[in-house]
Image (cartoon, rainbow, N blue to C red):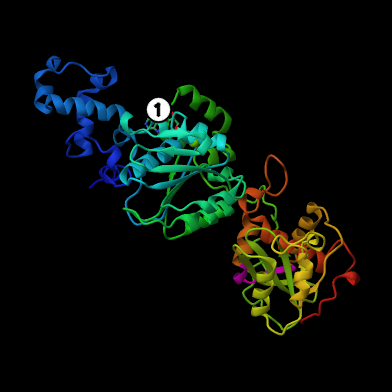
Amino acid sequence: MDETAASLQSPQGRSEGTRPMTVVASPDELRSLAELFADDANEGGHEFEEWDAEQRKTLSEGQYAAWLRDIKYGFWFSGRPKQFAPPGDWSIWVVRAGRAWGKSKTGAEWVHGRAMAHPGRWIALIGKTSADVRDVCIEGPSGLLKCGFPEDRPLFEPSKRRVTWPNGSWATVYVSEDPDMIRGFSGDTAWIDEFCKFSSALEVFQNLQFGMRELSNDKPRILITTTPRPMSILEKIEAQPTTVTVVGSSYENVSNLAPEFFDQLKASYEGTELGRQEIYADILSDSRGRVYSSFSSDIFPAGNIDPTVKDLGGDILVGIDFNVLPMSAVIAQRVVDECHVLDAIELKSSNTESLAAEIRKRYPGRNIIACPDPAGNSRHSSQRAGQTDFAILRAAGFEVRAPKAHCAIVDRVNNTQALLLQGGRRRLRLHPNAAPLIASYKGLCYDEDTGAPDKRSGLEHLCDAADYLTWQEFNLYLTVGTWGSSSWST
Ligand SMILES: Nc1ncnc2c1ncn2[C@@H]1O[C@H](COP(=O)(O)OP(=O)(O)OP(=O)(O)O)[C@@H](O)[C@H]1O
Ligand SMILES: [Mg+2]
């Protein structure tokens, strides 16, 4: 079976609701029929009596009527092979494609097919804002209200954030601005549109995964459609063995768009770095825009990764960012004037108490010095009313060291940057065990709009945790003599 045939016949692409009514053998035959009747399809059909002899041999009158209807409404015919779900056992299908490639169309048709294939199915529709989901995924030219045959079209009830199909399947609208809402979802199908525009992309994805659990006619499946940005959560998702990624350039949809659009696209982006991202959907991985641009994932001394870093038995230093998801901690030791990172911990759905217990479990009997977010001294912990996060850490037996107030983000980032590389020295070394922090240093970029580190990536928590530690204990803005007094391991 060629690629086209495989795609057109995949169960997700051609589920019950969108299956062609005409009895046909192969996509190739369909295409030659289309050529034969091209004028009929464009003009809405001719009387069967008007057909010439060759046409009459091809189809009966009933088949002809059904075929015209299929051509008019059926995405199975107009969709490009890449717009159909790939065959196989994948759990996540990523469509990473350029602007106007047909990402939203792909998502809407897939959702419609899944809704029609299994009555009573609950689906999550996730976008950046509720206006995005409404205007693009539901009501737009590519939206759900334009998919399938007229009698199969769903009803949209904005006040209930709900789309309901005639067979009882329904979809609920969720937005990245409120990732906690997704905790209420329990289904087997989710479509995330423009993932890379999300604030809290990581939280959205984590919360969604817990809700993908219902039994149905198929395994739980998530579709992510997006034009990329350098976001390590996307790279992590694409790297999972159960993910299938389809990459496409804007030009693949040229036949469905006004030529003026492409003139504009070319004038704005062709031949530029941003064009690689916006047209060809490349993930830009150079260091421009990276917050920790001094970080290198080469092995020490060329870079900051050092597999020989080990626990030398001195004080355990812990940088902590709390009341965030995931709870994030960086474990390190001082070796003379260097900071050696042993590990990075991320705990989903956790709290300060559990994080402290986890660290204590890993380092029993050791002197633990916590260098947390200074806000934890005044703010009551979100988990335990009336108690601060500092108090919880102290109760766990940790010594707590932190400045009285926050320093400017730019200062603590610059301090870490200097530890990563200054004067040819790399004083911040990371063991490969600290993989989540390594990914964060590689992936955290500045937000083009705000100029601050991009919170949408979910990568800032571990970087913040490490910054609190380095600012407190390895502060190059202060003189060496006043550095933190954690014991030295030599
Ligand atoms: N296979 C197709 N056949 C016909 N029209 C298509 C097809 N795929 C996409 N289109 C049309 O092309 C236009 C752009 O598609 P769509 O909005 O899905 O692109 P997109 O990649 O989501 O764009 P954006 O980058 O703006 O989000 C829409 O009018 C859509 O209906
Ligand atoms: Mg779109």
Picture coordinates of residue 459, whole percent (x, y):
63, 56
Q: Residue 482: image x %, image y %?
A: 90, 70
Side of 399 where 47 appears, left or right? left
Mark 1 beta carbon near ligand 1 (under 8 Å)? yes
* Rendered-image quadrant of the C terminus: bottom right
Q: What residue is disc 1 on?
A: 256
Classify mark 1: residues with Cα within 10 Å, few (<14), some (14-19) or many (20+): few
Horizontal side, residue 405 vs residue 434: left or right = right
SS type, badge 1: helix
Q: Which residue is painted at 54% across and 56% down in the image?
A: 206
Q: Residue 124 appears at what percent x and percent y?
A: 47, 46
Question: Would you identify the image quadrant in which residue 257 lies?
Answer: top left
Give the residue type that dot 1 points to: Asn
Q: Is residue 246 visible?
A: yes
Question: In the figure, is residue 158 to the left or right of 348?
Answer: left
What residue is rendered at 58% in x and 30% in y?
Answer: 268
Vertical placement of residue 289 versus 417, above or below = above
Report the span colored magenta.
427-434
Residue in front for this viewpoint, 178 or 1: 178
